[in-house]
Each structure stands twice: as C-alpha cells, then as structure tokens.
Amino acid sequence: MRKRLLLLLYSGGSAPDLIYPSISKLDTDIVTIYIRPENKALNDLYNNWVGKYGDAIEVKSFQEMVTEAIAYHENKPIHGVITFGEMVLDTAAQIAEKLNLPYNTRKSIELSQNKYLQRKVLHENGVPVPKFHLIEDENDLKIACEKVGFPAVLKPVYGAGGYHIASVESYQELVKVYTDFTQSYKNYFVENGKPDFLLEERMEGVKWHKEDCYADYLSVESIIHHGEIYHLCVTDRTEILEPFRETGYMLPSTLGNDSKESLYQIAAAAIHALGLKNGVTHIEIKLTESGPKIIEVNARPGGGIPFRLRLADPDYDLFYEMGRLSLGEKPKTIPDFKRSAGSFLLHGPNYNVKIAELSNIQTAREIPGLELLIMVKEAGTILDPKNSLMDMLGFAYVSGKTHSDLIAIRDQLIDTLNVKYEPV
C-alpha cells in the first residue's frame, strides 16, 4: 500500500536542515516544490537537503508551484500541503483548494497578510485594534491625519518584523517619512502586493510584568485543527529599539494564568474573525490602559517559534505537528515546558552605519546556554535601521532555567562580540 504524500512548498523561510528531519518522522512520502533562494548560505543548505527525502521540483514562480503540484498530483496523489514562508501561504491555499486538502482558505490568508483588510475585519467583529486609515497615495495623507490623529505610526500594508515602520508626530513629518518610504520600500512579503501604507494610532503601552526587561507587548502562539483553537503558549518580548526593531522573545511567559487567559481570549476572537481554520498562528498583542489590542495576526509560526518550543520542551516538535495537521490529523496541542527558551536579535545603532569589524564570533558560540548563533551580516555591510530584521547583525537561540538566565546569556553575548562601525 502506497504511503500518504506530503507536499512541502519552499521559498526561503525556515532552514531546511531544521524542517526535513522533523517531517521525515511522519509516515509519509515527501515531495518538495521550491524556488531557489538568492542567499548563498541558504542556497548551500538547499543543495544539501532538498531532494534528500523525496522528489524535488525547482520552479521560478509561485504560479508555477501551483501548476507543478496539480500535475504531480495526477500521477501521485497528494494528501497534505505544508509551508512555513509568508510569501508561500497563498500558494499553499490555492493548491489545497484545488486538491481539496486541509488548509486555510485563500480569503483568510489574504486577511492575515493585508494589514488594512485585517484591521477592518477585526474592527467590524469587535476585536480591539488601534485607530487606522489606509494610505494609497499622497492624497490620503491629510484625511488619515484627521481620522487617526497624532502621535501615529506609519507602516506598510504588507510587511513584517518592523520593516519600514516609523512613528510620526505631525503632518509635516508624515509627508517626509511617507515620501522616503515609498521610494525605499520593497514588498518582500506578498507577490504583486500593492505598496500601500497604513496610518495607525500609536498605542501607548502599559507593562504587565514587574521586571524592566519586558516590553509592553507580547505574542500568542496557537494551533488550529478544523476550527478548534489550541493555545500553545504566550511569548514574552524584550524592549524594542527605535524605530521599531524587535530584540527578543522568551517562552513560556512568566505572566499569571489569569493574564494569559485574557490574551488567549482576544487571540481566539481574532482567529475566528479572520476565518482561520487549519494551521498555526502568531498573534502580536499590545498591552494598553484600555486593555489588550491586536497588533497583527500571522497565519504561520512566528520566526524561531518551532526552535524555541523544542528548546523549552524537547518532546514538542512544531514542524512535525504541522505536518500531522496538514494531513488532517489532530496534533499534540499542549507543550510540557521543562525550561525557558528564547531568541535574541542583534542590531546596529539607530542610524545608517557600515560594519568596520566583526569578530569573536567563535568565542561567543562557546557561551554556556547559547544553543545557536547565526551572524547574517559581515564586515563591509551597511546597516539601515528602518529595514529592521532585514538589516540585523544576527540572532541567537538560548536556553536556561529562568528568563533571568536567558537575559544573562544575551548580555554576555553582546559583551563578547567585537563589533565596530564607521560612518556611511
């Protein structure tokens, strides 16, 4: 009897050396349809892993992914489709729709990716969000100011990780930043997405933690099986750097059960409003004086969440569970956290610089509790803070008994790395 067949769609996203060992534990065959990455290090990983666990088909576009999947299905029936990259979510939904496979609908994926439509639907369904207004061109700037007021935040309709987000205090500043952003913004997130922006109320946060190291926002990680929502955990966050650069994630949260339950309730309301039925969500929530408000809903795991979950509970493998979910099976929904795990993002200054020197990397990798250190930039690279995660120095995964242990490892890492800059 032929095994079930799992289709993996790949275009960047999580590294294949983390994914294939997990999904290969499923009692399935695997076929991969992929677009080759431009990044050399990731491309080398593709060469080592793609095709190792089954057929591999290289394509040049997302539409070609759909065509090849349908053609492959005619000879070898596909039983599930899985992906982890933001840009491939709609493609996976298209394939699942055509082959009648478990997945989110294309409409729900659109709502998760288009921040304007997402805001609109959440607001209409009574889910707390900041005031907002769509900016399609410069003619919308004045009315956006009237609707939203100041202080405000300008952000792209399609974006992630703090990319091209700025706080603005006046109409004049909005015009300046909007002009700059429309010239420098590139849509890395959704194929053929318009370069529109949102002006949003700048939410003033309050902290629910007693310690200063925590930010006034956090995220809820959930898994959905045929419309049933299971919350895996709350992820605490560390303070952001200007303009809007994320710095760290630690799980499980140190908040009390009542606080976490209130976050789970707003996360579930957002999931239901957007019509998400099958998959994993990463929902960022701002803590305000008037209560929690949704920052954004993502229909995929947050960056690094599978790895952090496994560090905190070695028996919980989110990649594997997502594979089961894609085949229609109910996944394991409750991690058993045995320790704390986190990841920290390493950034440059709050202005454009060139990296003059970057050393002591190997010494840093020997720090106890530092599980993985990836440096994505090298000497000679220019860093632009408005590009946020796309222009970070690197990132690290750490584990320890408590969040205090994680913070101590982060501080030792920063002290150990020798980074010097020069003006651009």
Image (tube, grey):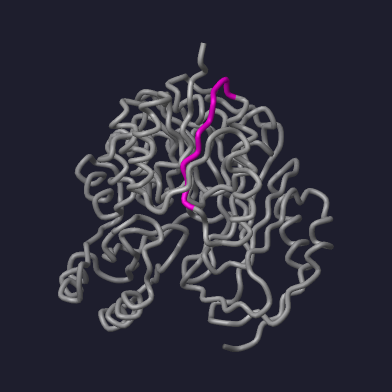
| Residue at image point 56% right, 47% down | 14
Q: Is residue 185 above or below residue 78?
A: below
Q: Is residue 45 above or below residue 133?
A: above
Q: Position of residue 77 (x, y in %)?
A: 40, 23
| Residue at image point 63% right, 29% down | 316
| Residue at image point 34% right, 67% down | 153
Magenta residues (range): 26-35
Q: Residue furthest top?
A: 1
Q: Is residue 29 magenta?
A: yes
Q: Is residue 259 among the parts visible in the rendering?
A: no
Q: Is residue 46 among the parts visible in the rendering?
A: yes
> Residue 22 occupies which quadrant of the picture?
top right
Q: Is residue 418 magenta?
A: no
**Number of marks:** 0
Side of 219 where 305 appears, left or right: right
> Residue 178 occupies which quadrant of the picture?
bottom left
| Residue at image point 31% right, 75% down | 182
Side of 187 where 44 appears, left or right: right
What type of secondary structure mainly makes up the magenta span?
A: strand
Q: Is residue 177 above or below residue 70?
A: below
* Camera-side residue of 86 and 247: 86
Q: Quadrant of the C terminus?
A: bottom right
Q: Position of residue 419 (x, y in %)?
A: 72, 75
* Camera-side residue of 36 and 108: 36
Q: Position of residue 171 (x, y in %)?
A: 25, 79
* Camera-side residue of 290 and 203: 203
Q: Residue furthest front?
A: 75
Q: Position of residue 144 (x, y in %)?
A: 20, 68
Side of 236 where 140 appears, left or right: left
